[in-house]
């Protein structure tokens, strides 16, 4: 009787602990945090390299752990040299179901909204597919 009760309790514990989890893993969120620079474009995917900080005269962006987003980009509409770079502020969120990043950032012309799908994410490399 004690054995049956023990097995029933064990079975119940296993079934209750095995629920579907649609949230993003802590590892994926933590890996995303930080600065990403040196974009390499290949069709509809862009590969970025992790950096300790954003580079002075190059495009890049940073994901903050509090949902803050910084995009370093050309400060105006004209890309004719010499160009100046500026940090634009915004926010970001990550969907755990499909690994999609939603970014809203202000810039000189208003607000930009980006929707990116994470294709690959490692400690040193981020590959994104632009969805919009």
Image (cartoon, rainbow, N blue to C red):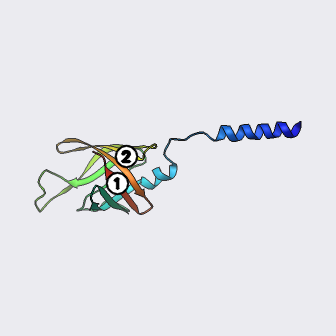
At x 74% / y 40%, what residue is drawn? 11
Q: Residue at x 27, y 61 (%)?
A: 41
Location of residue 104 (image quadrant) = top left
Q: Are marks 1 and 2 in contact (CB under 8 Å)?
A: yes
The answer to whether residue 8 is above or below residue 44 is: above
129 or 108: which is nearer to us? 129
Residue 98: image quadrant is top left
| Quarter of the image where the N terminus is located | top right
The C terminus sits in image quarter: top left
- Local crowd size for mark 2, using a 10 Å CA cut-off: few (<14), some (14–19), many (≥20): some
Q: Secondary structure at mark 2?
A: strand
Q: Which residue is mark 1?
A: 128
Q: Position of residue 67 (x, y in %)?
A: 39, 44
Give percent across and percent down for residue 6.
82, 39
Q: Which residue is mark 2?
A: 101
- Label 1 and label 2: CA atoms lie apart by 9 Å
> At 17% across and 52% down in the image, what residue appears?
75
| Residue 119, percent from left and from top | 39, 54
Q: Nearer the viewer, residue 122 or 10?
A: 10
| Tally of marks | 2
Side (left or right) of 78 relative to 49: left
């Amino acid at each position: 009787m004690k054995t049956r009760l023990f097995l029933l309790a064990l079975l119940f514990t296993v079934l209750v602990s095995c629920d579907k989890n649609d949230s993003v893993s802590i590892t994926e969120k933590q890996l995303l945090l930080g600065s990403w620079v040196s974009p390499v474009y290949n069709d509809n995917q862009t590969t970025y390299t992790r950096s300790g900080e954003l580079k002075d005269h190059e495009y890049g962006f940073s994901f903050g752990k509090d949902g803050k987003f910084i995009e370093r980009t050309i400060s105006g509409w004209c890309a004719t040299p010499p160009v100046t770079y500026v940090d634009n502020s915004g926010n970001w969120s990550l969907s755990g179901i499909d690994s999609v990043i939603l970014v809203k950032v202000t810039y000189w012309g208003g607000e930009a909204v980006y929707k990116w799908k994470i294709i690959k994410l490692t400690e040193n490399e981020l590959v994104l597919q632009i969805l919009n």
